[in-house]
Every structure is written in C-alpha cells, then in structure tokens.
Amino acid sequence: MRTAYSVETVRNAERELMARLPEGALMQRAAAGLAAACAQVLARVAGRVYGSRVVLLVGSGDNGGDALYAGARLARRGAAVTALLLAPERAHAGGLAALRRAGGRVADAGAASGSAGESIARADLVVDGIVGIGGKGGLREAAVPLADAAARSRAAVVAVDLPSGVDADTGQVRGDVVRADLTVTFGTHKPGLLIDPAREYAGAVRLVDIGLPLPAEAAELEALQHADAARLLPVPAAESDKYRRGVVGIAAGSARYPGAAVLAVAGALRGGAGAVRYVGPAGDAVIARFPETLVSDQGPERAGRVQAWVVGPGAGDDAATVAQVLAAKVPVLIDADGLRLADADAVRARTAPTLMTPHAGEAAALLGVAREEVEGARLASVRELAARYGATVLLKGSTTLVASAKGGPVRVNATGTSWLATAGSGDVLSGLAGSLLAAGLSAVDAGSVAAYLHGLAGRFAAQGAPAGAHDVAASIPRAWRDVRGN
Ligand SMILES: NC(=O)C1=CN([C@@H]2O[C@H](COP(=O)(O)OP(=O)(O)OC[C@H]3O[C@@H](n4cnc5c(N)ncnc54)[C@H](O)[C@@H]3O)[C@@H](O)[C@H]2O)[C@@H](O)CC1
Ligand SMILES: Nc1ncnc2c1ncn2[C@@H]1O[C@H](COP(=O)(O)OP(=O)(O)O)[C@@H](O)[C@H]1O
Ligand SMILES: [K+]
C-alpha cells in the first residue's frame, strides 16, 4: 500500500526522529537522495553531471536548505551550480556555506532578476527549493518570475519535496505554482502529490526514505498497489457455486438510456459475482448482448435473491425503483440518476453498506456547491459527502477517491487514465464495483478495487488511442490477470 501523511503528522514524526539523531542528519539524508535523483536527471539531459549547469531556486526555509546541500553535492561532482536566493538574509546558513565551499555561486534572485532569468534559460536542471511543507497559498510575487522562467526553459525541473506553491495536505492549487518534471519527496508522499490538481504539477514522484516513524493508522491517504488489489480480488474456490460467489442485481437503464444497463451489466459480469440479475426496462437489450444475464421484469423486490444492488445508471426519473433498492437489506451502490433520486434520509437510515459513486458534477449537486469547488477540493468534498450521507463515497474523475463515513485513510486510485473520460465508462465502473460488493468485499474495498481494475482496463483498452466504454469493460479480464500476475 502506498500511503500519504498530513504535514502535521510529518512534523511530529520529524521531531521524534530528530531527537534521536545528530543535528542536521535528517536534512543530509534528504539532500543525499535529492542529489542522487538530480544526478540521474542530469545524466539524461546533459549526458553527465560534470560540466552541467544547475540553478537552485532557494526560499527561506528548510526546503531551500535541502536544495543548497544537494547543490553542494552536485558541485563537488563538477556541475556549475548557481543558487538564486529569494530571501538572502534568511537562506539556510549551513546549506549556503556548504555550497560556497563546494565552489557554487550564490546570487540574490531579486537584485539579479535579468541575469536570473538568463541562468535559468541556459540551465540543464532547475531545482525548486522555494517552499515545501511550510508553504501557505500559491507562490509569492517574487518567486513567480522564476517559476515562469523555469517553465519556459528547456531545463528539467526537479521539485524538492513538493512543487512549490501547491497545498501539501489537500492538493489544492491557489495561484501560481511550479510545474516539475520530477518531485523528490522525503519520508512519505504528501496528499497533494496524489490528488489533482496539485498532482499534475508534480510530474513523476520519487520517494526518498529518511526513516520517519509514521504509524499506519495515521495515514491520510492510501493507494492500492497490485499486491493489495490481488489480495482483495474474490477468486472462486473449489467448492464455490454461483450463489456462493454472489449475485449482483442491476437496476439501471430506461427506455431512453438502455445502453447504461448494458454497460453496467458488462462491468458486473467481470467483477467476480457468480451471476448478474437485471431488473428494468432494458431487458431485451441486455439479453441481446449478454445472454448469461438473469433478466426479470418484476421490480427489485420480487427479482429473487441478490447479495448487492447497483441502482441508478441511466435510470431517468424512476424514483420508485431507487426507493425499493434502498429498502433492501443488502449492500447497495447508488450511481448517476440514482444519486439525484435517492432520499437522503433513506440512505442515512440504511444498515447494510452503501456506496455512492458521484462524479464531480453529481457531488457538487449533492453538496449544493459549484462543480469547480469540488474539483479544487476533492479530499474535503468526498469526506463531507461520506459524513453527510453516512455512506462510503467514491468520487470519480481525474483523481478517484474513496472515503468511508467512519473516517480513516481515504483511498486514492493511481491507475486511471484520462482516456476513461468517455461516455458510459462510469456505468461500467458501477457494475464492476457492485459485483465486488456482491462477492463480499466491504464498500471501501469494492470501490477502490473497482477503480483500480477500471483504471487499468482503461489503459489496456486505450493504449494511447480513444476507446469506448464497452472496450473498457472488455479489458477488465486483462486487468484482473495483470493484477494477479498471470
Ligand atoms: N519535515 C521533515 O521531516 C523534513 C523536512 N525537510 C525539508 O524541510 C521542508 C520544510 O521546511 P520549513 O518548515 O522550513 O518550511 P519551507 O521551507 O517549506 O517554507 C518555509 C518558508 O517559506 C516561506 N513561505 C511560506 N509560504 C510561501 C509561499 N507561498 N511562497 C514563498 N515563500 C513562502 C515562509 O515564510 C517560510 O520562511 C520540507 O518541505 C523539506 O523540504 C527535509 O530537510 C527533511 C525532513
Ligand atoms: N481525466 C480523467 N482521468 C482519469 N479518469 C477519468 C477522467 N475523467 C473521468 N475519468 C473516469 O472515467 C469514469 C467516468 O465516469 P462518469 O463521469 O460517471 O461517466 P459516464 O456517466 O458517462 O459513465 C470514472 O471512472 C472516472 O473516474
Ligand atoms: K519545493
């Protein structure tokens, strides 16, 4: 499991560790990891470290200190290193002395604004040590021209700990921020490195272990890896039969949107349940495409046994079906139109698990805010929805998050691709997650494993070219095999 911790938790762990280590040891660990990563980048962009040109953007805190010590290491290996100081009187004294001893140059970024831009333009590598976890708000005015020059330059940009200016705890971006090709982060990922919009500015992320003592239960975010997903996938045993594997009921589609039913069933058939039952007006379309579906023209109450329901994709205005499903004593996934039609009190009153799967627009409507507000603050939004509805909430989009009403780490999915932004791919996800619920996974596990498989399937289906939602569904078995290593 990959984890991310809040700034407060990182600071506490840092204090605890520093008390046991000699002065400055932690920063040296960070700087050594940073310098090694920079050397690899230089080998790629300039052929070697010796003779390459490196510019350090140095703010007033320890983030700048990391950059200065790493710059000193690169200077000792023969790089021409220039530090541009944003606050010369407050720059890290030890780091500055180390850089000077190693033969690096130091300039006041403000006083040398013209030549600062020139050195950045000529650099092979720009190291962003303006601000790290101590940052508040976007970049301050004096730093903006440096970030702009770095963006225009052909130099590679390596961010120290975080791209300067992004919010470490939330992934929010307010104002100008640095755009990095690589972020070298210390001790743990920070939430902002895994959540859009900030994530986009981090480029590739490399974690340098500095030995921070971080308790697993205090994680802010968790991201499943292949091994985690593999452990959670429901695999039939010798004595399994279709009922023991779970039956998932799909109450979806309408005369106007029969395709949503077909796509939800397509996802459900690949989710590990032993059987898929469909109720609704699109039975003929479903059977024509997937003859293995058990189709019923009775409502959800009379459809026969199911272990979990999916309600809502393409449901139009059929509030009665949504209400019937919510009254069922089995896990329920509510998606799309179902989110609008579901009575909030009925959702809160449920005793079996509930998984809601809104995209940002649907989440905004449920919260009564603008869509942009949700997109700018995904973590707070998904937690707020989970708390309000007493349900597990999976917020879809460029970063998919899954939050439980009980609190605890929020799951973030790292497998997605923007090729998934195609009509109907959310229907496939809901069927897939519902099937995992029916197979016995908890709502958080079902949602996060479904997002994981769906993201991988999207990659396999697209491979750099547009793919339709049915292609995503058809690629789910490949995603399973990839996760299970066969
Ligand atoms: N906490 C840890 O465990 C470790 C921290 N290290 C480094 O230390 C950093 C944190 O250092 P600090 O606490 O000194 O904080 P920072 O260096 O992140 O920033 C603090 C300074 O930046 C200024 N500042 C705040 N917001 C700004 C903005 N928007 N634009 C420009 N300047 C702004 C503040 O006035 C303050 O002086 C980490 O990000 C990391 O790079 C590492 O050396 C190793 C371990
Ligand atoms: N930019 C993106 N990057 C990664 N995944 C995305 C992006 N945009 C959308 N997705 C994913 O694609 C799916 C789209 O679902 P949804 O918005 O409900 O579409 P629809 O209603 O057409 O099915 C979700 O799984 C979502 O997480
Ligand atoms: K930084």
Image (tube, rainbow, N blue to C red):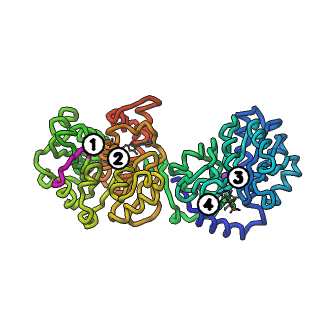
Q: Which residue is denoted by mark 3 in the rendering?
A: 142
Residue in the image at 68% along x and 51% along y: 160
Amino acid bearing label 3: Ala
Amino acid bearing label 4: Lys
Q: Which residue is denoted by mark 4 in the rendering?
A: 136
* In the foreground, 20 or 198: 198
Q: How far apart are marks 3 and 2 (CA)?
A: 57 Å
Does residue 404 appear to the left or right of 135 in the view shown? Answer: left
184 in magenta: no
Earlier along the polypeptide chain: callout 3 or callout 1?
A: 3
Ligand 1 contact, mark 3 (Cβ < 8 Å):
yes
Q: Is mark 3 on a helix, strand or loop?
A: helix
Q: Distance between the residues labelled 4 and 2?
A: 47 Å
* In the foreground, 454 or 338: 338
Q: Is mark 1 on a helix, strand or loop?
A: helix
317 in magenta: yes
Ligand 1 contact, mark 4 (Cβ < 8 Å):
yes
Foreground label between 1 and 2: 1
Residue 255 shows up from this direction: yes
Q: Magenta segment, which residues?
A: 313-320
